[in-house]
Image: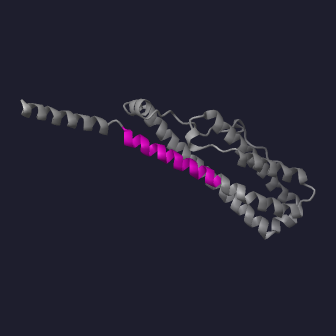
Amino acid sequence: MMKNFNMKMVVFSCTALFGLSSCGYNDLQGIDEEVKASWGEVQNQYQRRSDLIPNLVETVKGYAKHEQGTLEGVVEARAKATAMNIDASKLSDPAALKRFQEAQGQLTTALGKLMVLKEAYPDLKANQNFLGLQAQLEGTENRITVARKRFIDTVAEYNKKVRFFPTNLTAKFMLHMEPKATFEAEASAATAPKVQF
């Protein structure tokens, strides 16, 4: 009788271990950490851009004294963008991510206007400080694009694990995980920009 009971316990333990190993608990925890890390990199790249902007604005101020409105627009957009932060724990809120994205989009637009000033000020185009900052800013924009792409891919993988069977049961009932929001293209992205000379 005792031998039979021990055998049933061994079978039950093996079944329980097999069931837990296929529930995706560790996979879900791992992908959640990857989402947080990729979001941290997005924020890191936006911070890098924000840190470069004051230097760029000061360099341009020396040449473009008549362009105060453009410079003030960049400073104001930077202030709004740096004031808007999203903690990785709030990535399930699509509205918060949209507000963050809009603030960053306004800064991108303001920076675009600032870069156009170099055409109006030939001396500015030759200034090494401006050229160096412009190159760093362009590189930063590329890094932001790469970081956002990684974040989008990681969130897609996370959302699949949270929604697909059987890991969705573990996500919902054991870990209380919800799908996370991701970046969406801005409404203006569908329209090609007009280039005028």
Query: Residue placed at 42% from the left, 40% from the top?
Result: 28
Q: What percent of the width, then of the height, locates residue 69?
A: 89, 50
Question: How many dots with numbers?
Answer: 0
Relative vertical location of residue 89 with respect to residue 138 in this rendering, above or below: above
Q: Nearer the viewer, residue 123 or 83?
A: 83
Q: What percent of the width, then of the height, locates residue 58?
A: 83, 62
User: Dividing the picture into quarters, in which one does residue 99 lie?
Assistant: top right
Q: What percent of the width, then of the height, locates residue 166?
A: 36, 31
In the image, taking residue 53 as reference, residue 30 lies left or right, namely: left
In the image, taking residue 57 as reference, residue 50 lies left or right, namely: left
Query: Residue placed at 74% from the left, 63% from the top?
Result: 133
Query: Residue placed at 69% from the left, 62% from the top?
Result: 136
Q: Nearer the viewer, residue 87 or 1?
A: 1
User: Dividing the picture into quarters, in which one does residue 89 lie?
Assistant: top right
Q: Does the magenta segment cover residue 79?
A: no
Residue 60 shows in the view:
yes
Q: Does the magenta segment cover residue 44?
A: yes
Give the magenta range. 24-45
